[in-house]
Amino acid sequence: MTAPRYPLEGVVSWNMNTTCNYRCSYCTQRFVDDRKQWARDLPRFVAALAALPGDWEVKLSGGEPFRHPDFLGAVEGLVAGGLRVSVVTNLSASDEALAAFAAITAPRPGVLSASLHLEYAEPRAFRDKLAAFRDRHAGSTHATCVATRELLPRLPALKALFAEAGLDLRVQPEKQDREVVAYSPAERTALVALGGHNGTGQVDPDLSGRPCWAGARYLIVDHRGEVYRCYPARRRRQERLGNLLDGALDLRPGPTPCPYAYCNCTVPQQRGMVDIAGAPSASRDR
Ligand code: SF4
Ligand code: SF4
């Protein structure tokens, strides 16, 4: 299989904190021992991210990144360092904080991905808040929602509600013990009809053996600066590429074959860093 072309813009997913103001029942981080941790020494993080070779987008996530005690300061520093800044948020931040994020990132806007959590947010109010943000954001804006088995039948109507305001609501398969839950064949069909995981058309693709730029042009960085090739690598504590703050990253020189049976990293899939065409489902063997 031929490797995809060099991705001009790399992407770092920076999990900058474990802090969150919600406690969603399906949260994959709900068993994290300390949910009050955040990246300290922001100037060193920002300097290290700005020093990565080539052009990069930094995708901020958590926890809830807007709960980081100096979230907007971090965004300012990253933008000043020439980086595109995106964010994954539960949209509970104030309108003022959201407007500040839009203004700071305007010179090189990224993506705001807003997760709708129905245990905490009312869909219409959430949609309207997101639409108001979208109208002042120069980048792209969309919503996501975890497709629990209970929620799945409601998702087509919810998707239509967001579409009324010109917003895309993308679905994320529910995970338990870090694997996609045992959806029935009919539920899988429904998930694909809703666009698959984050609009990729796939639910839980097995991309093992395919050349992938993760580790070279896609990285996961946690709140302590630990760097891994991608989420499955971090989960297994393998393909660790160093620590961002000690200045000795061992980035891959180019694409290498994926060793994982289940890829839940939609960024490399959507940015053409790995070919997902015709991928089998990872759950076929489970
Ligand atoms: S908002 Fe996100 S990080 Fe916070 S509890 Fe819910 S799923 Fe977890
Ligand atoms: S799991 Fe996904 S992101 Fe990681 S190496 Fe495989 S294809 Fe690439």
Image (tube, helix red, strand yellow):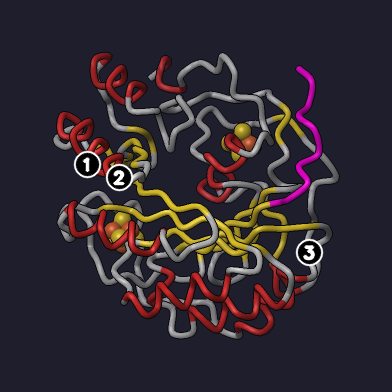
Between the residue at mark 3 and the residue at mark 2, the CA separation in whole angstroms equals 32 Å
Residue 191 is inside the magenta segment: no
Q: CA distance from mark 3 to mark 1?
A: 40 Å
Q: Is residue 234 visible?
A: yes
Looking at the rendered image, the disc whose residue lies closer to the viewer, 1 or 2, is: 1
Within 10 Å of disc 1 (Cα), the crowding (few <14, some 14-19, many 20+) is some
The residue depicted at 49 percent of the width and 38 percent of the height is 264
In what quadrant of the picture does the N terminus appear?
top right
Horizontal placement of 284 versus 138: left or right? Answer: left
Asked if residue 7 lies in the magenta stretch, the reply is yes
The magenta segment: 1-10
Q: Amino acid at mark 2?
A: Cys
SS under mark 1 = helix
Identify the residue at horizontal 54%, vertical 47% (top origin). 231
Viewer-side residue, 246 vs 20: 20
Q: Which residue is mark 3?
A: 52
Residue 152 at x, y = what percent? 20, 32
Q: Label 1 sits on what residue type? A: Leu
Q: Is residue 231 above or below residue 91?
A: above
Q: Which residue is mark 2?
A: 145
Identify the secondary structure beneath mark 3: loop
Q: Residues within 10 Å of mark 2 (few under 14, many from 20)?
A: many
| Circle on res. 182 | none
Question: What residue does disc 1 label?
Answer: 161
Could you say where residue 281 lies in the image, as x and y percent from the top left? 46, 19
| Relative to 190, 226 lies left or right | right
Ligand 1 resides in the quarter of the picture at: bottom left
Instruction: Name the residue at 33% across, 59% down.
Output: 130
Which one is earlier in the sequence, the residue at label 1 or at label 2? 2
| Pointer 3 or 1: first along the chain | 3
Q: Quadrant of residue 184?
A: top left
Tell me the amino acid under the disc marked 3.
Answer: Leu
